[in-house]
Image (tube, rainbow, N blue to C red):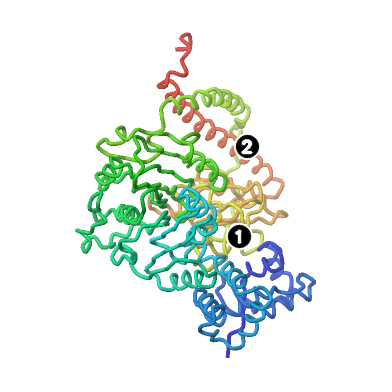
Amino acid sequence: MQQRARVTAADIARLAGVGRAAVSNWRKRYDSFPAPVGGTAASPQFDLDEVEKWLAGQGKLAEVAAEDRLWRALLAAAGDPSEALAVAGDHLRGVPLLPYENLRPDLDSLTAHHGHRKVFADLWQRFADLPGQRAVTTPDTLADLMVTLAGVRGRTVFDPACGTGRLLRAAIGGGATEVYGQDNDPAATRLAKLWLAVDDLAGHIHTGDSLRHDGFTGRTFGAVVANLPFGLTNWGHEDLGYDRRWEFGVPPRTEPELAWVQHALAHLEPGGRAVLLMPPSAAGRRAGRRIRAELLRRSAIQAIVALPAGAAAPHAVGLHLWILDRDTPASAVLLIDATALDVNASTAKIVEAVETGAGLAQAVPVIDLLDEEVDLTPSRHTPASDSGHNSAITVQESQQRLAELIDSIRDLMPNLSPEADPSGPLPAVAVGDLIRAGHLQLLGPVRAASADTDPIPDRPVLTSDDVLHGRPASGHTDLRIAPVIPLRPGDVVVPVLAPRLTARVIGDNTAVLGRGLHLLRCDPDTLDPWFLAGHLRTSANERQAGGSSATLRFDVRRAQVPRIPLAEQARHGAMFRALQQFDDALRAAAELSGALIRHAADGLAAGLIQAEAEKL
């Protein structure tokens, strides 16, 4: 018996054309909403037929698209996304037939209406949209940038680490005539081969380890593009010591990326170009300096682009693009630092810099790079004059902002005075008791979720560091956490692990709760959030809620706050809010003064600013 098709909450939101939060609200508000039939508590799965009937009954959906229904049925039958897509692709080619007889009529009906290529493309898109695939494939924006820089139009293209063929698909879209790839993952190369066969494209996909068992020995191509595997020390160093591909030097065991660079160059025909996605460490590690020097001497490196963080996984790291060329003599290398740009807005500026050598590009003479370190990191070769010019402008702006901040700090300083007749400590109540009484709700901490968990909605994630440093939410939206808890104005957040007990009051609803944070949500009729946050930060509560190590684990339920009426809480809260505003202004002034000193030093070194003699 075939398993019935299932959908996640994210699928339901997409089918109904609403946000993920709407689906969560439906589950809470309507007892008739279908119960989960599988999955996990963090990512429940629902029966597609039941969901469709419920949505239609509520007037929220006319009909589920046939492609969505078929894809979900294939997933349920195959159990593995790669297998589901593969068996559908085999059927569309005619051999072998789909093993799930009950689904054949649906697949054949779609094919009759849309054609086998359109149906396969639709199923592929649903496969590519799965969270697990988005985490391991090259994002569309970056893939298009790489094939543009490689100049693939009218050329043959090779990807030595092709996976399911994402970069090769971009190359076909960019005008490549034939595409070739190799990967050691049989499930991935099966799909890449199917894509070529279904779309009747020229090329070949080989399964195997590209470095140990090159499937294209002696073949050269007009362009090479690759999102390389990083940090694999077991790449075959012991077996490949005398390989003819190492014309620029035998790669040390700790430099697998430089083995891939030489593998790409060995397959590049004269006049061709290779564009490789590399970890930033490959540009500066000492172990690879001799090979980098030889690549420079022989003009193999044309440009290195430092990408913004978040351009591809791992998203916390700003990766590099290495642009290689076999036979174009060059006395300089273009070093392009795009790390300060927005990920999605950087493409046009990077293409302009590479093609024209203007804009972001710095043409650094090869002789200047051939020092003891041979460090090719773009940010380390920014001319002093450029940074000095920018610093001269920034110094003027920073001086004015700092003067305004200093004036505001004087006004923000609270007027605190000791009580003339102190009445002693106020009666207290534990936070745990407030939670049990319903005056306070404790949420979190959230945890890391598996790759198949639905992604966070397009909102920033508040992290522990954000709370400790008093800054806005800075976490990436591609993180996967469970459960997803949107923050509301008035929520109080407390880091679980921190050097000191810190509580912050949330001022807007733009972010979601990150890992390692407790969220306290007050009943506004009985508890003031600023009062709560202020009293949580007392020395007594830090001892009461914390442990004895240098970085404390805080159990906020053990903290205590005064038991006083709401009106008195509001007066305390107003004082704590004023103190917080004063502290925020001091932090901003300290940060701005540090930046001012750095920019002033750059400007002075470049001779673009000067100190007024009478103020020295």
- Give 72 or 192, whichever is nearer the viewer: 192
Residue 409 locus on image (x, y percent): 59, 28
The disc at residue 578 is 2
Mark 2 vs 1, N-terminal side: 1
Element at badge 2?
helix
Q: Is residue 340 left or right of residue 363?
A: right
Along the viewing direction, whichever of 389 and 202 lies nearer the viewer: 202
Q: Quadrant of the N terminus?
A: bottom right
Residue corresponding to mark 1: 485
Quarter of the rendering containing residue 173: bottom right
Q: Amino acid at mark 2?
A: Ala
Name the side, left or right, on which 357 lies relative to 488.
left
Residue 22: image tag: none
Q: Residue 429 at x, y = what percent?
A: 59, 56
Q: Quadrant of the C terminus?
A: top left
Residue occupying the point 63% across, 37% down? 578
